[in-house]
Image (cartoon, grey):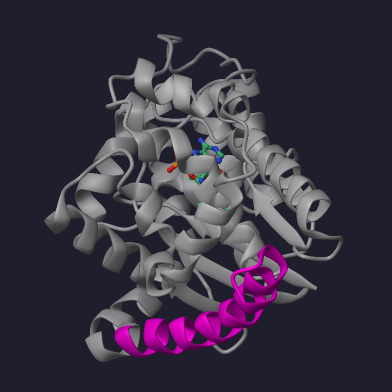
Amino acid sequence: MRILTGLQPSGKLHVGNYFGAMEPAVRLQDEGEAFYFIADYHAMTSSQDPVALRENVRELAVDFLACGLDPARAVFFRQSAVPAVNELAWLLSTVCPMSLLAKCHSYKDKTAQGIAANHALFAYPVLMAADILLYDSNKVPVGKDQKQHLEVTRDLAMKFNDVYGAGTVVIPDPIIREDTAVVVGLDGRKMSKSYGNTLPIFGEEKPLKKLIMKITTDSTPVEAAKPTDGSTILALYKLFASPSDFAAMVKAHEQGGVGYGDFKKQLADAYWDFFAPMRVRRAEILADPAFIDRVLAEGAMRAREEASKVLERVRRAVGLL
Ligand code: AMP
Ligand code: TRP
């Protein structure tokens, strides 16, 4: 079974990305042949900045490896290292109705946010379909926000097989992570870069712990019992603390006598400890810059090998060979 997913290099990873995307991807490495890539072509649909692109790709590679991606088990590569994906995107676009793309909410959301309505942004789901079909992927783990793109992928794959013959491309199944709860941000809304309420995974201890001290709370006095429902501190603490520590903090809320400042300090310590092994791994990776290059070069080679097999089959089916 082949499992494939892509992550956009869009700046510093936050705790929401970790629990919503990285941690599930790392777990799935054991369940099949994992192909994980950095979606650099996709990142260019919303920002055209060469310096930032280079930096963000590098940072995502380092962070993903630090979080447990194992290059001995997973094929890890940059999307653009396999330019053949553009050829498959072109072939898929010949069977893609305009109306299929016009209804995609991600395009509508992004243009509503002020991102330029360029052709690449509109065609984004076709390139994503090509990412998936180029590697005969069976399972594609994604967040809920990508559900519609997976539907487009399946539509295009079935249409392609209708036109060019059954088995020309493999129809993939999404694994939608419905179960991963939305991670709340420091202000109690969904943690998201666009809300400016994120808690990064990596960074300096003092400023990161300071962010936690800024979490919005109500003004219940120290002595009084504190609400547990809808508590941002508890929601985040649950991610990092052991079940018994979490239960103890819930109890302390109910009993009163402990102030929010103390709860935040406990949260900050649990958060810092949770990511300690990843920080150690990250420092090791950063100390050996050639390691990243080696991993990505090796991944690119294995990805290209697989892609060329699939593309040859597709080229034959459509009459290019
Ligand atoms: P983004 O960079 O916001 O597109 O996020 C990349 C992926 O991280 C998404 O597809 C989600 O799976 C995951 N993610 C981002 N923010 C959160 C959050 N607050 N809670 C859970 N998962 C998240
Ligand atoms: N669009 C995805 C996102 O923003 C990233 C992505 C690109 C992807 N190509 C993919 C995910 C193929 C899964 C499969 O999160």
- The residue under the point 47% across, 88% down is 301
Please name whichever residue, 184 or 228, is drawn nearer the observer in this view of the structure: 184
Please name whichever residue, 108 or 155, is drawn nearer the observer in this view of the structure: 155
Q: Position of residue 252 (x, y in %)?
A: 60, 30
Q: Position of residue 321 (x, y in %)?
A: 62, 77
Quadrant of the drawing holding the N terminus = bottom right
- The residue under the point 40% across, 47% down is 14
Q: Position of residue 231 (x, y in %)?
A: 55, 22
Residue 199 visible, this angle: yes
Please name whichever residue, 16 or 88, is drawn nearer the observer in this view of the structure: 88
Q: Is residue 297 magenta?
A: yes
Q: Vertically, is 20 above or below 66?
A: above
Q: Is residue 206 magenta?
A: no
- The residue under the point 53% across, 73% down is 68
Q: Vertically, is 158 above or below 26?
A: above
- The residue under the point 39% across, 79% down is 281
Q: Residue furthest right?
A: 166
How many numbered marks does the figure carry?
Answer: 0
Please indicate whether residue 267 sits to the left or right of residue 70 in the image.
left
Please indicate whether residue 48 sits to the left or right of residue 26 in the image.
left
Quarter of the view holding residue 152: top right
Q: Which residues are magenta?
A: 293-321
Please name whichever residue, 202 or 267, is drawn nearer the observer in this view of the structure: 202
Q: Residue furthest left?
A: 51
Magenta region, main secondary structure? helix
Quarter of the view holding residue 66: bottom left
Q: Vertically, is 58 above or below 267?
A: below
